[in-house]
């Protein structure tokens, strides 16, 4: 099975296409996971070619940032050995918001701007 079929690519918003939507209200469209070590990649946006913007969650931490489809396709928990373990798309995942996802992934709350008042994601426009 292809990790990201063409029909799913077409439905993903472009990177930076919704600047007025808070991260908490941003839609999470797809979940990839590594069943052997509990890493998860939640897809929020896609550049249409190879780069995602999303959330990466492990047992120890959560981060928001960019990563590529190519990286996910080549990741293996055994350092590239072919033993049948690989990144998979969660076929049972239902799209949700980042805020709702926090209920099952509490580490995400630690990276939201509301939790870090010194982080400014949008600068005020010049007057």
Image (cartoon, helix red, strand yellow):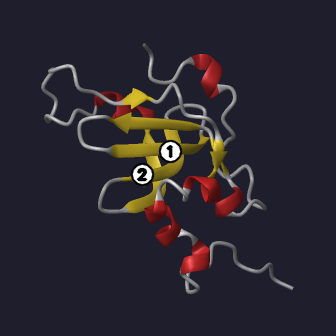
Residue under the point 42% across and 13% down: 1
As helix, strand or loop, the secondary structure at mark 1 comes to: strand
User: Which residue sits furthest right?
Assistant: 127
**38, 11: nearer the viewer:** 38
- Pick whichever of labels 1 and 2 is earlier in the sequence: 1
Residue 2 position (above or below residue 24): above
Which of the 4 quarters of the picture holds residue 94?
A: top right
Residue under the point 45% across and 16% down: 2
Q: Position of residue 70 (x, y in %)?
A: 38, 31
Asked whether, in this view, residue 85 is left or right of residue 42, the answer is left
Q: Position of residue 123 (x, y in %)?
A: 70, 78
Asked whether, in this view, residue 112 is left or right of residue 59, the answer is right
- What is the number of the mark on residue 26? none
Q: Position of residue 29 (x, y in %)?
A: 62, 38
Tell me whether the residue at label 1 lies in contact with that at label 2, contact meaning CB atoms closer than 8 angstroms.
yes
Kindly identify which residue carries mark 1: 42
Residue under the point 43% across and 33% down: 69
As helix, strand or loop, the secondary structure at mark 2 comes to: strand
Pointer 1: residues within 10 angstroms few (<14), some, or many (20+)? Answer: many
- What is the number of the mark on residue 56? 2
Whole-number angstrom distance, CA of label 1 to CA of label 2: 6 Å
User: Which residue sits furthest top?
Assistant: 1
Residue under the point 56% across and 69% down: 112
**127, 18: nearer the viewer:** 18
**100, 98: nearer the viewer:** 100
Which of the 4 quarters of the picture holds residue 11?
A: top right
Which of the 4 quarters of the picture holds residue 37?
A: top left
Q: Quadrant of the C terminus?
A: bottom right
Pointer 2: residues within 10 angstroms few (<14), some, or many (20+)? Answer: many
**91, 17: nearer the viewer:** 91
């Amino acid at each position: 099975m292809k990790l990201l079929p063409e029909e799913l690519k077409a439905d993903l918003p472009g990177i930076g296409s919704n600047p007025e939507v808070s991260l908490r209200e941003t839609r999470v469209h797809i979940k990839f996971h590594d069943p052997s070590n509990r890493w998860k990649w939640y897809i929020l946006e896609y550049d249409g070619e190879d780069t995602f913007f999303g959330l990466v969650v492990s047992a120890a931490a959560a981060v928001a940032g960019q990563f590529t489809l190519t990286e996910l396709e080549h990741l293996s928990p055994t350092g590239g050995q072919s033993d049948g373990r690989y990144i998979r798309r969660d076929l049972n995942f239902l799209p949700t918001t980042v805020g709702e996802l926090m209920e099952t992934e509490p580490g995400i709350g630690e990276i939201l701007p509301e939790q870090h008042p010194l982080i400014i994601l949008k600068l005020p426009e010049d007057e």
